[in-house]
Amino acid sequence: MKPGEVIKELRIQKGLTQSELSERTHITLRTIQRIENNEVKPSMHSVNELSKVLQVDILNLSKKTPENPNKIEFTFKINDMNQLLSDIKSLVRNNWKLLLLIALLITFLTNYTDIKAGISDGWKGQ
């Protein structure tokens, strides 16, 4: 079973239309249609959003078995720089606060001795 077919099956099992899935995942309706028709491979961002809404870890699905008929195997390749940039933008957009905190922490730690000396000098009135 192809990835798009499994995603379509999972969507139908959840009782969702393509439009409803599009609204909940913030993925365009046309992209969902193309994924389900196996016209395109979903991006990591799309897989992540689909996993959340469909309440299944799509990345950890492997080959189909009688116990789990919806299992499939995904292979991801970065073959489009625009898609990579889009995924990076999405990462920054969704996690900007954490990234800012990490950058500030790194800046503080790398300049700790200068900061400490400046505070000490300021305290002494120099």
Image (cartoon, rainbow, N blue to C red):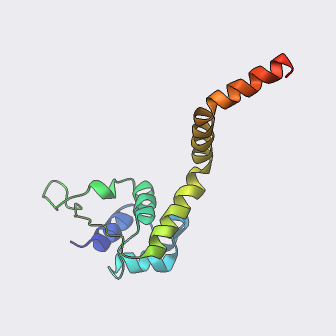
Quadrant in which residue 112 is drawn: top right
Kindly give the residue lying farthest to the top in the view shown.
Answer: 124
Residue 120 drawn above or below residue 86: above
**Residue 15 in view (yes/no):** no
Q: Residue at x 36, y 79 (%)?
A: 40
Viewer-closest of 5 and 85? 85
> Residue 11: image x %, image y %?
38, 66
Q: Quadrant of the C terminus?
A: top right
Residue 27 drawn above or below residue 55: below
Count of numbered tags: 0
Residue 17 drawn above or below residue 14: below
Q: Residue at x 75, y 27 (%)?
A: 118
Quadrant in which residue 73 is drawn: bottom left
> Residue 121: image x %, image y %?
78, 22
Q: Does 4 sit left or right of 87 as displayed?
A: left
Q: Quadrant of the N terminus?
A: bottom left
Viewer-closest of 93 and 118? 118
Viewer-closest of 55 and 57? 57
> Residue 109: image x %, image y %?
58, 33
Q: Residue at x 34, y 81 (%)?
A: 37
> Residue 15: image x %, image y %?
41, 64
Q: Residue at x 36, y 75 (%)?
A: 79
**Residue 3 in view (yes/no):** yes
Q: Does 26 sit left or right of 6 as displayed?
A: right
